[in-house]
Amino acid sequence: MYSLTEAEFRIKAEPFLRQVFVNDDAFDQPFSKRVVGRLIMYPCEYCIEPPIINAIIDAAANLGDTGCYISLYNTSTSSVEPNHCYIPLEDFIEAYTMSGGLERSIDFRLSMNPYGLDSIIYSASGKWGLITSHERHGLLGGPVEFIEEIRSAVPDLDRQVYGFLGRLRMLLEACQIFPADVTRNKWLQPLLIHVYGEEKAEQILLEAKENPTTIYD
């Protein structure tokens, strides 16, 4: 386990990051074309909690990975604390979830807080990644078998996109925008098409429009 300076990140980690995500915008269309399996996760709080983080690490190990990187974005590159680190998969769960105690955590050992809402956890071989946002959604991508393994461990995984749409609806209502129609967000349809393909994206948007108060349960 070790931290990386910005210069080290550019050389060691960013080339693998860009094999998964071509940009660091979870509201845009960030996946590389080589990433076939894709989905939206919600909620992604400061710490990705079990069982999903365990499923991600297990699936990564089954792809042959032995480690991954964590990068924080929308942060100052001149910060004294590092924005990037490498974690061996065998140490990841206890270091990230602090299940091994504070003294074995990423924060304690590397003086890096890995729980920024704008963060990316990604393969050290460029095979998979999870980018999260300040609106608490995440974009998870990798090979089809990687996604299928996680899906089998997290039964509600494919319904989590509706939780994200529910959050968007709540934000519209909080801003007193009525009707609170999330389908009017101009960036939403391109994002859904980017993740799910046009047919599935249209189905999700249709459900959101026809059942705005019930699909999020």
Image (cartoon, rainbow, N blue to C red):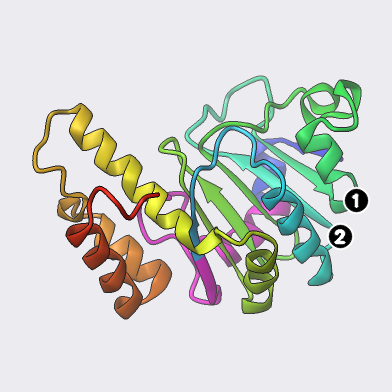
User: Residue 66: which disc?
Assistant: 2
Q: Indicate the position of residue 62 as horizontal and vertical percent values.
A: 82, 70
> What residue is shown at x 64% (from left), y 35% (from top)?
47
Structural crowding at the residue carrying mark 2, measured as other residues with C-alpha within 10 Å and reported as few (<14), some (14–19) or many (≥20): some
**Could you tell me if the residues under marks 1 and 2 are in contact, i.e. CB atoms within 8 Å?**
yes
- Residue 125 lies left or right of residue 26; in this view the side is right
Task: Return the residue at label 1.
Answer: 90
Structural crowding at the residue carrying mark 1, measured as other residues with C-alpha within 10 Å and reported as few (<14), some (14–19) or many (≥20): few
Residue type at numbered disc 1: Glu
User: Residue 22: which disc?
Assistant: none
From what the image shows, is residue 21 above or below residue 196? above
Where the N terminus falls, by quadrant?
Answer: top right
N-term mark: 1 or 2: 2
Range of magenta residues: 12-38
Q: Quadrant of residue 172?
A: top left
Residue 22 appears in the rendering: no
Q: Quadrant of residue 134?
A: top left
> What residue is shown at x 34% (from left), y 64% (from top)?
192
